[in-house]
Image: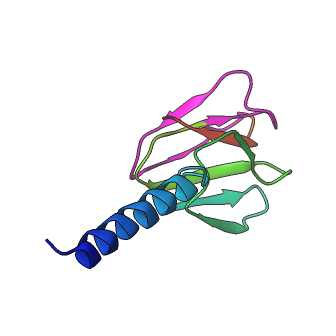
Amino acid sequence: MSVRRRLTTATGAVLLTLAVAGCSGLDRSAVGTLEYETERELLVKVTSPSVNGCHRMAPSGVTRVENNTLVDIMLYPTRDCRGPSTYLATNTGDSIPPDTLPWRSYSVVH
């Protein structure tokens, strides 16, 4: 193998390592869409939400959710992902029962 070829290979390996290291800090996301309907019948569509943290939904609350992502989510009636929760598996949907508090936040199961 020539010196030039080895140098090119080594340079490529270094650049690839730097590229991978630079991307490792990026926020991971749930691939797909999360759609929900507010109590005021407004349809909201979130594309590839982050898998990190608690996500607030509409302040008025949400009555129906369609989880078309590749991950499961937890739905909460509070704005801070606390309290009783509802588990919603990937590619499923759910609605709140009558006389139940609407959902106001969600987190991703990972």
Q: How is the image coloured?
A: rainbow
The residue at the point 67 percent across, 49 percent down is 63
Q: Is residue 38 magenta?
A: no
Identify the residue at the far top of this view. Answer: 83
Q: Give the answer, above or below, for where 33 lies relative to 100.
A: below
Compare residues 29 and 20 and report the one nearer the observer.
20
Quick check: can you spot residue 33?
Answer: yes
Q: Quadrant of residue 99?
A: top right
Q: Does the magenta stretch mainly form a helix, a strand or a loop?
A: loop
38 on left or right of 32: right
The residue at the point 82 percent across, 38 percent down is 79
Compare residues 88 and 70 and report the one nearer the observer.
70
Please state the total of marks drawn on the protein image.
0
Q: Is residue 88 magenta?
A: yes
Identify the residue at the far right of this view. Answer: 59
x and y percent of residue 71 in the render?
Answer: 44, 45
Compare residues 51 and 60 and report the one nearer the observer.
51
Quick check: can you spot residue 103?
Answer: no
Identify the residue at the far left of this view. Answer: 1
The residue at the point 80 percent across, 33 percent down is 80
The span shown in magenta is 75-100
x and y percent of residue 55 in the render?
Answer: 72, 46
x and y percent of residue 58 in the render?
Answer: 79, 54
x and y percent of residue 95 in the render?
Answer: 57, 46
76 on left or right of 59: left
Q: Quadrant of residue 77?
A: top right
Q: Give the answer, above or below, for where 12 lies relative to 87.
A: below
The residue at the point 60 percent across, 56 percent down is 49
Which quarter of the image is occupied by the N terminus? bottom left
Compare residues 10 and 110 and report the one nearer the observer.
10
